[in-house]
Image (cartoon, helix red, strand yellow):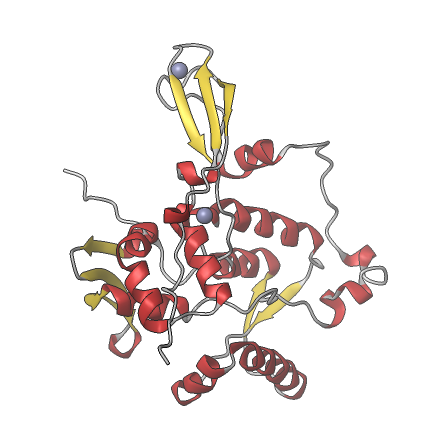
Amino acid sequence: MNRQEFEIAQIIEQFGRDYVNKHLPNSRTLRTLNALKICRTSAMGGHKGKCDHCGRVHISYNSCRNRHCPKCQASKQAFWIEDISERIIDTRYFHIVFTVPEELNAICILDSRKFYNTLFSSVRQSLQTFGYTKFANSDHVIKYLGGYTHRVAISNERIQQIDENSVSFYYKDYRDNARQKLTTLPGIEFLRRFCMHILPKGFVKIRYYGILSNRFAKQTSMYRKQKPHRGKETVQQRIERLTGFDVYRCPYCKKGYMREVEVLPRIRSPGNFLRPKHITIKV
Ligand SMILES: [Zn+2]
Ligand SMILES: [Zn+2]
């Protein structure tokens, strides 16, 4: 029997209101939680399609495309890997991993934007000063990084159970040889920790310096890989080429194609959105 599948959206639905009222998150966190909560539901609107082979009708709801949504990263990751593979200078690279001491976590919570920016500039300065490192070819590095660049705080596959009060999920214990362990947290605490991973607005988490930066694109063009000519592609065609998933293929008979018969509008019900209760002050 297959295990029941759980999603971040269910946790937000179940514990989001209590989390918001207890912790009063900022507007960016609220917007992110709301986007993940309604991703691929009727609240986002969508399309009704009819198969041209078996005649079955299927409804597909729109995605939120939020960078923290576990359901919306697969195609972004595939696009990134292809884009960078085709613009990279064709040589061998040093692959270097920096880690942050646990003691600095408190500063990150206070001002994550300043913390991450400082981290990037410290890394840059360190690289200009030292050399320790793992040597790898560009394809290897890109595929490895691709596993991290679009990773979100927790994937839905790691969530094992949601009950009335708590959430159980797998994590890797790096103090114990990265062993996979199951842990359980109260739902509100789970959301508090999840929200600590929400990046500042507009934050650029993949940055190119030196000869990889756009400033040197012209001077280094002759050393870059030649982009294969493919002609014009729609987003759906590109997804199919890179992942093998045909978004138009009928999910029932797998033979026909879904033809759009109706566009479904977004449902903007106030009940779909989290917001803190109004605070009233009695005088
Ligand atoms: Zn989404
Ligand atoms: Zn069909």
* Rendered position, 39 above or below 249: below
Q: Nearer the viewer, residue 45 or 88?
A: 45
Q: Position of residue 110 (x, y in %)?
A: 47, 83
* Rendered position, 199 above or below 266: below
Q: Residue at x 59, y 31 (%)?
A: 237
Q: Nearer the viewer, residue 263 or 54?
A: 263
The quadrant holding residue 283 is: bottom left
Q: Position of residue 193 (x, y in %)?
A: 34, 70
* Rendered position, 237 above or below 89: above
Ligand 2's quadrant is top left
The quadrant holding residue 30 is: bottom left
Q: Position of residue 58 (x, y in %)?
A: 40, 23
Q: Is residue 108 left or right of residue 279?
A: right
- Residue lying furthest front in this view? 283
Q: Check the picture and name the quadrant holding the N terminus.
A: top left
Residue 38 visible at all = yes
Q: Nearer the viewer, residue 154 or 84?
A: 154
Q: Nearer the viewer, residue 102 or 15?
A: 15
Q: Position of residue 130 (x, y in %)?
A: 62, 87
- Residue lying furthest right in this view? 219
* Rendered position, 59 above or below 167: above
Residue 151 visible at all = no
Q: Is residue 101 left or right of residue 12?
A: right
Q: Residue at x 47, y 86 (%)?
A: 107
Q: Is residue 93 left or right of residue 63?
A: right
Q: Residue at x 27, y 70 (%)?
A: 189
